[in-house]
Amino acid sequence: DADVTQTPRNRITKTGKRIMLECSQTKGHDRMYWYRQDPGLGLRLIYYSFDVKDINKGEISDGYSVSRQAQAKFSLSLESAIPNQTALYFCATSDSRTGSYEQYFGPGTRLTVT
Amino acid sequence: GQSLEQPSEVTAVEGAIVQINCTYQTSGFYGLSWYQQHDGGAPTFLSYNALDGLEETGRFSSFLSRSDSYGYLLLQELQMKDSASYFCAVRGGGATNKLIFGTGTLLAVQP
């Protein structure tokens, strides 16, 4: 089983709809991140969380919200989706205890807003 | 502001050596990472440099010069499976593991 999973893998939704993307991890990592990837723009950080009670905005948090329901779960919500939120969304994790700076990415969610 | 620059595309042949450069301008710097991504799949970690010099891991090496705000990824003995996008990412300031990613370099390995 994959260590970092994302659901759904693909989603098409209409403008104005609320949508939630979910991320779960079995790695036991304390830190979790949400990124979006657009063609030609690389990955940009939306929100990150160091533990259940610590959530921080990234570069492009406007229009998004997050919830860290447990150490293993980190959800991203689009309260009212708009077409320019069409992108590939990745969840990632890292472990602050190991001294490693590696982030582990999930398989991604491809979101299309029409 | 913060920016990372890397070439958008590089082409090389199987068995060759290729170098992908990355220059950065960031507020605060703790280290430079490299990630590989195949066809929109999950990015995977390749290397991390916190100090100046060359780090070698098998066919891949990564170099950092903090004084020049510059690093590169060196891929040797190229294989077809190395065709992918490669991203440099700066670990920024503060006690965080936040990464600022470059826009990626698409490497095409030809037979």
Image (spheres, coloured by chain):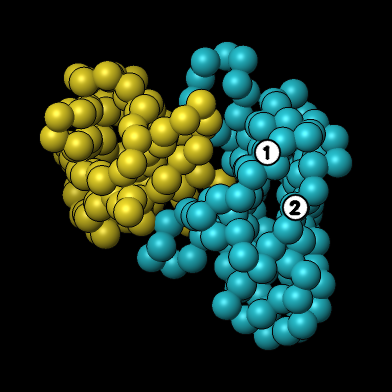
* Residue located at (77% from left, 82% from top): A16
Q: Quadrant of residue B69?
A: top left
* Disc 2 packing (10 Å; few <14; some 14–19; many ≥20): many
Judge whether A95 appears above or below A15 on screen: above
Q: Earlier in the sequence, mark 1 or mark 2?
A: 1
Q: Nearer the viewer, residue A75 or A60?
A: A60
- Can residue A21 be seen here? The reply is yes
Check contact, mark 1 vs mark 2: CB within 8 A. yes
**Chain A, chosen colour in render:** cyan
Q: Chain of mark 2?
A: A
Q: Quadrant of residue B23?
A: top left
* Residue located at (66% from left, 80% from top): A82
Residue occupied by mark 2? A66
- Can residue A72 be seen here? The reply is no
Side (left or right) of A43 relative to A63: left
* Residue located at (74% from left, 67% from top): A78
**Chain B, chosen colour in render:** yellow
Judge whether B65 appears above or below A13 on screen: above
The amino acid type of the residue labelled 2 equals: Val
Q: Extreme top residue here?
A: A98
Residue occupied by mark 1? A49
The amino acid type of the residue labelled 1 equals: Ser
Q: Extreme left residue here?
A: B68
